[in-house]
Amino acid sequence: MKDRCKHVVSFGEVLWDIYPEDKKLGGAPFNVAAHLTKLGTQGYIITKVGSDALGKEILKAIEEQNIQTNFSQIDYTFNTGEVLVSLDHQGNPTYDIKRPVAWDYIHTNLENLSLVERCDALIFGSLACRSERNLKTLKDLTEISQLNICDLNIRQDYYSKELIERLLAYSDILKVNEQEAQLLMTLFNINTEDFYLRLTTDFDIKLIIKTLGARGSEAFHQDQFYKTDGIGVEVIDTVGSGDAFLAAFVHHYLQENNINNCLAEGSRLGAFVATRPGAIPTHSFENITI
């Protein structure tokens, strides 16, 4: 029997992905929150936008995803975040992430502390922690969160070994892709065979998830290894497919804690999103067929 509706808060960037032909709402934390809400887990976002027209558009778009804007702070100094996105012939993105922008300056306040305290999990990544202000705010939030989930989400050169060490130390659950796993092995001098055991031991991480693109995904939990095969699709745009994977995984993990099913459902939603333009395509999850 499934439990009550779960509540999960994402911390970090909400921004505009600027494509050659148009713009789409993006930012990994927001993408995850939006997909969680579509799945039936109420998502929230703690973020900051500028007082400009793009910020007002973001607040409206957040509400259109059935997510409250109460925890979206307004910055009167810095502009709303933008990312210039270009896609190669296989639909793989490259990003030009502007800085400094409003979401670099998210402050701790009573509202976001209260939200995190009553939610079932907190999701965060490395990009939002490129500023010391956000890193301090995140530390405050992780200290009262029931479950800390790190989607490493490495972008450009906005990381360091010291930053990653801090984020891993905060984490109960870690999600990485293959490139991020390789980076961790290089930074911490870990070989492939010891990857999961070293990270879970050194940083006291309970669960590690690794996405493998078209080859599926795998996880390591309580000294047990899990793996699911990929789903073959015609890729249009991979932007947001990893975020969709994480949302589906977390939704099912909080409800039933069945790792194999969590991986399978994550792969299903991630594959679907890769067949559509944009990070948050309209869908009814129960009716998705791949």
Image: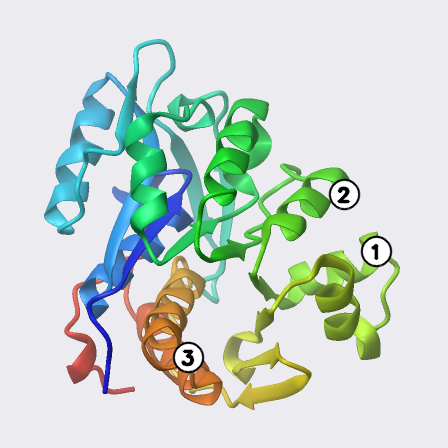
Quarter placement of the N terminus: bottom left
* Relative image position of residue 141 (x, y in whole percent): 46, 39
Residue type, mark 1 in image: Phe
* Relative image position of residue 123 (x, y in whole percent): 44, 52
Do labels 2 and 1 touch, CB within 8 Å?
yes
Image coloring type: rainbow
- Above or below: residue 106 compared with residue 92: above
Instruction: Using the image, tell me which numbered label, if any, was put on residue 188.
Output: 1
Which image quadrant is residue 14 in?
A: top left
Mark 1 and mark 3: Cα distance apart in space: 28 Å
Residue type, mark 2 in image: Lys
Disc 3, SS: helix
Disc 1, SS: loop
Q: Earlier in the sequence, mark 3 or mark 2?
A: 2
Quarter placement of the C terminus: bottom left
Disc 2, SS: helix
Residue at point 21% right, 35% down? 58
Mark 2 and mark 1: Cα distance apart in space: 8 Å
